[in-house]
């Protein structure tokens, strides 16, 4: 096994498992069990992305958001049990340490889009009890928590709803990482106003380098760094260059920029594997050692360790315990 030195804050592999009716051993995509092993995975965050609106047809979803979350969580639990000798779910930093010492990969269940909470505060507790330790408050649609990013400046300035403030507070009490990827800029600053510790943009890039509304402005990056948070650099070419191909240097360029604005301690990995459709210079997860080597060559080995796993692990320790 390669050295276990990669924490990836976001992938969409669970929906691939659902669509393909398969397991982690044979799923077709960026991530499978062997790719995680060969790629040097320490912790992989598996997001439950919940399709709504027209996305339900694309992904052939026939149930509501809460029902779909539970279906996806069942898939996660099934795969963790089936491959328990190689990969185990984690709910705290001690679990990660235990798995690392045993040579097992750690898997953290996360939520992309709080739509399934649907105004019901008890569901935040239920998500926590199910093992969710990070929640991206929105995807690309309005929900009971707040509003998504938008190319329209007025819409992008919309903040959290009153219920959204309550959700962020409750997440802090429970020990769940608040994820601001996909959130409106107004919502981002509302999170910063109410959150008590570090928060994360699990899979986002720098707006100055690529003007997509999903990316973070210089001011947002500075705030994220001031709070001790992390930005997991997204590998999607649409957020890196606006093209349809991701070169390793594109990722490094955003890492350098984020480090300049937020500090090297704020830079992390947020691949968005299995949720992106561009060609990647290094293929999929099995190619992560190539990326890690390039990061070390550009930033030095100590800073490469920070980017590849130490920064994300610090936030996990600080927030989830």
Image (cartoon, grey):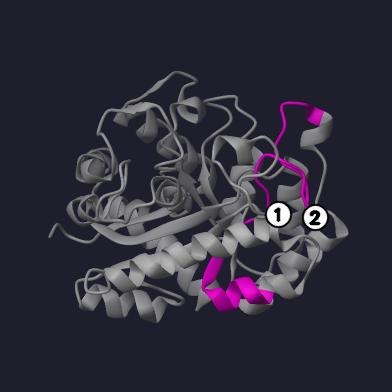
Residue 279 place in picture, x, y as percent = 34, 26
Q: Which mark is residue 144?
A: 2
Give left or right: position of 286 versus 172. left
Q: Residue furthest left?
A: 1
The vertical placement of 97 against 250, above or below, is below
Q: Quadrant of residue 65?
A: bottom right
CA–CA distance between discs 1 and 2? 7 Å
Instruction: Give me the residue at 23% from left, 38% from top.
Output: 294
State which quarter of the image contains the N terminus.
bottom left
Specify whether residue 296 is in view. no
| Residue 115 x/y as whole percent | 70, 54
Residue at x-position 41% and y-position 76%: 93
Question: Residue at point 58% right, 31% down?
Answer: 207
Q: Are marks 1 and 2 in contact (CB under 8 Å)?
A: yes
The residues colored magenta run 125-153
* Residue 266 seen in render: yes
The residue nearer to you, when weighing 65 against 12, is: 65
Badge number at residue 115: 1
Residue 136 falls left or right of residue 100? right
Q: Considering the numbered disc 2 on the image, is that residue within a helix, a strand or a loop?
A: loop
As for residue 292 lying within the magenta part, the answer is no
Q: Is residue 142 magenta?
A: yes
Task: Describe the element under mark 1 as helix, strand or loop.
Answer: helix
In which quarter of the view is residue 245 placed? top left
Above or below for 71 versus 300: below
Label whose residue precedes the other's in the sequence (1 or 2): 1
């Amino acid at each position: 096994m390669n050295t276990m030195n990669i924490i990836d804050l976001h992938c969409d592999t669970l929906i691939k498992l659902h669509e393909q009716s398969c397991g982690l051993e044979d799923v077709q995509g960026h991530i499978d069990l062997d790719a995680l092993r060969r790629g040097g995975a320490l912790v992989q965050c598996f997001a439950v992305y919940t399709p709504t609106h027209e996305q339900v047809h694309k992904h052939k979803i026939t149930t509501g958001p809460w029902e779909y979350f539970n279906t996806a969580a069942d898939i996660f639990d099934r795969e963790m049990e089936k491959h328990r000798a190689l990969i185990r779910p984690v709910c705290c930093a001690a679990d990660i340490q235990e798995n690392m010492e045993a040579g097992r990969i750690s898997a953290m269940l996360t939520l992309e889009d709080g739509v399934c909470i649907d105004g019901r505060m008890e569901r935040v507790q239920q998500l926590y009890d199910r093992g969710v330790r990070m929640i991206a408050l929105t995807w690309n649609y309005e929900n009971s928590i707040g509003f998504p990013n938008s190319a329209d400046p007025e819409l992008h300035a919309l903040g959290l709803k009153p219920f959204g403030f309550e959700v962020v507070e409750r997440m802090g009490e429970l020990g769940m990482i608040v994820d601001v990827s996909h959130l409106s800029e107004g919502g981002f600053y509302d999170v910063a106003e109410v959150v008590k510790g570090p928060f994360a943009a699990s899979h986002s890039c720098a707006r100055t380098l690529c003007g997509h509304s999903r990316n973070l402005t210089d001011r947002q990056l500075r705030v994220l760094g001031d709070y001790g948070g992390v930005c997991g650099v997204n590998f999607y070419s649409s957020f890196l260059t606006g093209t349809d191909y991701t070169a390793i240097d594109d990722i490094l360029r955003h890492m350098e920029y984020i480090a300049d604005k937020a500090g090297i301690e704020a830079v992390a990995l947020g691949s968005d594997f299995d949720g992106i459709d561009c060609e990647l210079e290094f293929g999929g997860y099995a190619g992560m050692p190539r990326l890690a080597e390039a990061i070390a060559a550009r930033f030095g080995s100590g800073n490469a360790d920070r980017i590849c796993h130490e920064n994300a692990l610090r936030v996990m320790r600080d927030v989830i315990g």
